[in-house]
């Protein structure tokens, strides 16, 4: 290289390569603008930092000289292949910080996304989207990962307060039902619950008054604090006005518990309901005339609860043909109830579990659970079977009476 100058750089590179002097070989190839061999020898000798520096130098040359830009387009794939090999090396070592150094050097964000998705590096992908200011995209990935609270924060950053508030309600429902050790009822309290309720209301406040009222009613139901029959009945009525399947079901269940926790000797006895219990109970609920514990009020709310659960069982059975709005609402309630994220792509649905350790998941054959990095998915048929079993056999376990 010293005697023959620039014309012998490629031969010099080959000599250094054969003798294992990879750093000198890379330098020779780089000086001769032999990009492919330079990056190849850097990969072979694990000279990742050196190769990355050469790529940065070529990019800066391209910015200064339009003639080199055309050449850089030709080596774009070579650069990407080299950077990907570097990233994969550190991925195998579980050194994600070093991995991202090379991912961030990719020519375009789509290449970065594709690699991180393929490797299942969702945390790194979320950070990448945030760095680029793509908060909506980051929120979608957080949902895919099942990190609902991170999704909420990202939705807020993207200005989607309404969606963020709804996601908090969804999180409150699932976590209240399936916190560790819970069997799905009653709604459990947990450390962040009141803080999250306050946040949901705060996010809803700038929205239309109807939405704020909806969030307030749902929050009060999910807090599940001790309430009078009149208060529970008012929440049920509000849920009906708001078209909230979740609110109706939870209120009906709470009111049933309220009845069955009482000594039957304290019930008021009325006889009009005996003529046609179902019709009578429907009219009583619609007219908002139930104000005390009685046999007819028990029948009313038992029938309401039964009606809703039967509707859910039917909807779950035809989950792929949910054209009616009410059926779709029941299906979404069922998904939310069990912490299942439905994601559709060209009419094909994938179903990810927010908490694979939830008690109801233990009844599913583990062979049908597919793990991909941080995600656990199941087939729709397995979810339908588990949901039907739950609602058919576990849909009401009356509490012990007191007194």
Image (cartoon, grey):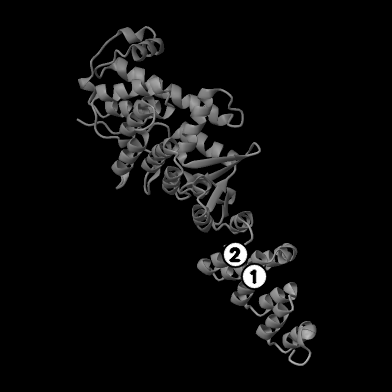
Which picture quadrant has residue 348? top right
User: Quadrant location of residue 63?
Assistant: bottom right
Which is more toward the observer, 166 or 301?
A: 166
The residue nearer to you, when weighing 23 against 266, is 23
Q: From the image, tell me which residue sits under label 1.
A: 55
Q: Position of residue 370 (x, y in %)?
A: 58, 51
Instruction: Tell me if I can see residue 389 in this picture.
Output: no
| Residue, far front | 65
Res 30 label: none
Residue 207 in the image: above or below residue 350: above
- Whether the residues at callouts 1 and 2 have beta carbons within 8 Å, the answer is yes
Nearest the eye: 94 or 377: 94
Q: Toward which corner of the image does residue 30 lie, by quadrant?
A: bottom right
Q: Which mark is residue 105?
A: 2
Which residue is located at x 59 percent, y 58 percent? 116
Work out which quarter of the rendered image holds the C terminus and state it.
top left
Packing grade of label 1 (10 A; few <14, some 14-19, many >=20) is many
Q: SS at mark 2?
A: loop
The relative height of residue 99 versus residue 338 in the rendered view (above or below) is below
Q: Is residue 3 left or right of residue 312?
A: right
* Spot occupied by residue 71 in the image (x, y as percentages of width and height): 74, 66
Residue placed furthest toward the bottom: 3
Q: Quadrant of the N terminus?
A: bottom right
Res 65 visible: yes
Work out whether mark 1 precedes mark 2 in sequence or the reverse, and give the earlier one: 1
Residue 57: percent from left, percent from top: 63, 72
Q: Residues within 10 Å of mark 2 (few under 14, many from 20)?
A: some
Q: Nearer the viewer, residue 115 or 41?
A: 41
């Amino acid at each position: 290289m010293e005697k023959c100058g620039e014309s012998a750089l490629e031969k010099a590179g080959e000599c250094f390569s054969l003798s294992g002097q990879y750093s000198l070989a890379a330098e020779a190839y780089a000086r001769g603008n032999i990009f492919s061999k330079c990056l190849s020898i850097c990969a072979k000798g694990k000279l990742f930092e050196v190769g990355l520096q050469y790529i940065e130098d070529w990019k800066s040359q391209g910015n200064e000289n339009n003639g080199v830009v055309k050449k850089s387009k030709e080596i774009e794939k070579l650069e990407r292949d080299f950077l990907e090999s570097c990233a994969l090396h550190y991925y195998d070592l579980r050194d994600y910080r070093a991995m991202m150094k090379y991912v961030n050097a990719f020519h375009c964000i789509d290449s970065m996304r594709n690699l991180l998705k393929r490797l299942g590096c969702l945390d790194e992908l979320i950070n990448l989207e945030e760095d680029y200011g793509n908060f909506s995209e980051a929120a979608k990935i957080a949902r895919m990962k099942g990190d609902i609270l991170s999704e909420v924060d990202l939705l807020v950053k993207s200005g989607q307060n309404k969606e963020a508030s709804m996601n908090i309600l969804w999180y409150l429902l699932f976590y209240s039902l399936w916190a560790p050790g819970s069997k799905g009822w009653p709604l459990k309290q947990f450390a962040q619950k009141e803080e999250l309720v306050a946040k949901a209301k705060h996010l809803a406040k700038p929205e239309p008054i109807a939405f704020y009222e909806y969030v307030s009613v749902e929050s009060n139901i999910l807090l599940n604090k001790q309430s009078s029959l009149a208060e529970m009945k008012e929440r049920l009525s509000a849920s009906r006005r708001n078209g909230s399947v979740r609110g109706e079901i939870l209120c009906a269940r709470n009111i049933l518990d309220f009845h069955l926790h009482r000594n039957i000797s304290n019930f008021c006895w009325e006889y009009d309901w005996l003529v046609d219990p179902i019709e009578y109970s429907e009219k009583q609920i619609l007219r908002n005339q139930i104000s005390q514990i009685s046999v007819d009020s028990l029948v009313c709310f038992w029938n309401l609860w039964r009606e809703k659960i039967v509707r859910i069982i039917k909807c779950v059975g035809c989950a792929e043909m949910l054209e009616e709005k009410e059926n779709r609402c029941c299906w979404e309630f069922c998904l939310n109830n069990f912490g299942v994220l439905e994601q559709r792509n060209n009419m094909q649905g994938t179903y990810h579990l927010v908490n694979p350790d939830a008690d109801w998941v233990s009844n599913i054959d583990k062979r049908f659970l597919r793990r991909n990095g941080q995600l656990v998915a199941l087939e729709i048929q397995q979810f339908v079977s588990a949901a039907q079993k739950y609602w058919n056999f576990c849909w009401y376990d009356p509490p012990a009476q007191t007194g």
